[in-house]
Image (cartoon, helix red, strand yellow):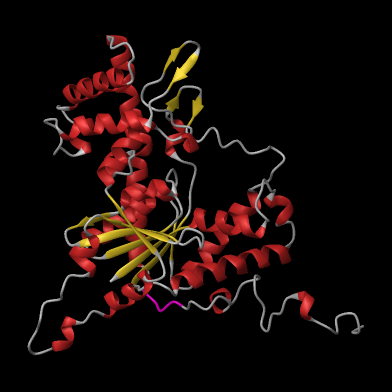
Amino acid sequence: MVNILIDGNYIFHKTFGIFGGYGNVDPGKILKDKSEQAAFIRKVSTDLCSSLKMIPQGGRLVFTADSRSWRKDIEIEDGGYKSGRVKDEAVDWTIFFELMQSFGSHLEKMGFIFSKVEGAEGDDLLMFWSDHFNSKKENCIIITGDKDLHQLAKISGGSWTAIWNNNSKKNTISVPRGWKESWLDKNESVNIFNMASTISPEKERFKDFLKKVQIEEIESRPFIFNKILIGDKGDSVPGVFTYMQNNKPINFTQRKSDTVYEAFLESEWREESFGTLVNSSESEEFLNWLSGLVIRTSKGVDSSENRIKVKSNIIRNFKLMWLNSSMIPDFVANGCTDEISRGISLEKRSVTLDRIKILEGTEWVTSGYQPKGFDPFEHLIK
């Protein structure tokens, strides 16, 4: 059984980029009247249904949306989390997010689960939902173009989570290393009383799907480790160590991070979970070792003051960028847990993937709708 988890923010922004003609456009102007809003939602519906028809399902369809992130309350030098994403004050995104809310609420009426929690980003919800389904021995595909979510690609107790970027220019599914051998190509157990048990329709559909996409394997552990050390410019999260040399900042680079990770693989902590390394009594020794290695690899001054700073930055970056329940504040984690209970309690219904029927009963589509330009008698009728 495959559950489909949809990054609603990605879907809406991707579609609006096409709908608005790309560039720095103002949703308040592009979506200024009801007819344009309806056309935009029909485009979202068309793209979403087209993608969903390509993949095997059988499980739940979950559409997630952002709330104001708890991460914005974590202090970062020279700004804050995602502070670089400054939108022109003249640009009104209100209608854009109101439409996402309305669309998600309507999808829930049509058999989806619309998931939004105070304080949580969509990324947090996608992590909690995938963990939930994997714990029930069910598989997940997350539809998103956000590379940060590659860290959620995993095999857990025989179940798995994969990440599909359904952008026509990318069209890549990111799977955990060993997924193909351990699941897709693995023979089913033979039952002499039911030879059909050797054939999995789900796998057959997957094999058809995989002919249309690129497959890339992800190792989440080095992906997360490197991300923590380097930071994320897109989210305004700096690397763990920067210093000035000849009036120029020396940043922590991918090459330096690779060197540190190779040393980590040779260390006594190589088998420990990240949670143990940053949230336990063993943390201090590890963080002291890692901070010193980071500084020396960067050819900085390995002083007590710099180590304290780097250790603090490592912990901060784990909180900001590692998608793990141990990093989430209790009020957000509890909200996500309650939301999953609510969503699962909803009646599971058959979902139409017809791009128009899925919008029935809304102002975004009318019976027998045709685009205005196709009516040759418009100006003849008085």
Residue 279 shows in the view: no
Please tell me whether residue 285 is drawn above or below residue 208 in the rendered image: above
Pick whichever, 45 or 154, lies toward us: 154
Which percent across, then down, holds residue 139? 27, 64
Q: Per the image, is 138 magenta?
A: no
Task: Determine whether 99 is above or below 299 in the image.
Answer: below
Magenta residues, as a range?
347-351
- Overall secondary structure of the magenta stretch? loop
Nearer-the-camera pick, 179 or 8: 179
Q: Nearer the viewer, residue 93 or 306?
A: 306
Tell me if residue 71 comes above or below residue 46 in the rendering: above
Residue in the image at 38% along x and 26% along y:
252
Q: Position of residue 300 (x, y in %)?
A: 34, 14
Q: Which residue is depicted at the point 23% across and 31% down? A: 278
Q: Is residue 288 above or below residue 16?
A: above
> In this view of the protein, can residue 133 be seen by the observer?
yes
> Quarter holding the N terminus?
bottom left
Q: Position of residue 117 (x, y in %)?
A: 43, 50
Residue 83 on image: x %, y % = 53, 32
Q: In percent of the image, x 55 and y 63: which residue is there?
A: 103
Q: Is residue 350 magenta?
A: yes
Q: Residue furthest left?
A: 192
> Could you tell me which residue is drawn at 30 percent across and 18 percent down?
295
Classify residue 155 by image quadrant.
Answer: bottom left
Q: Is residue 262 left or right of residue 243?
A: left
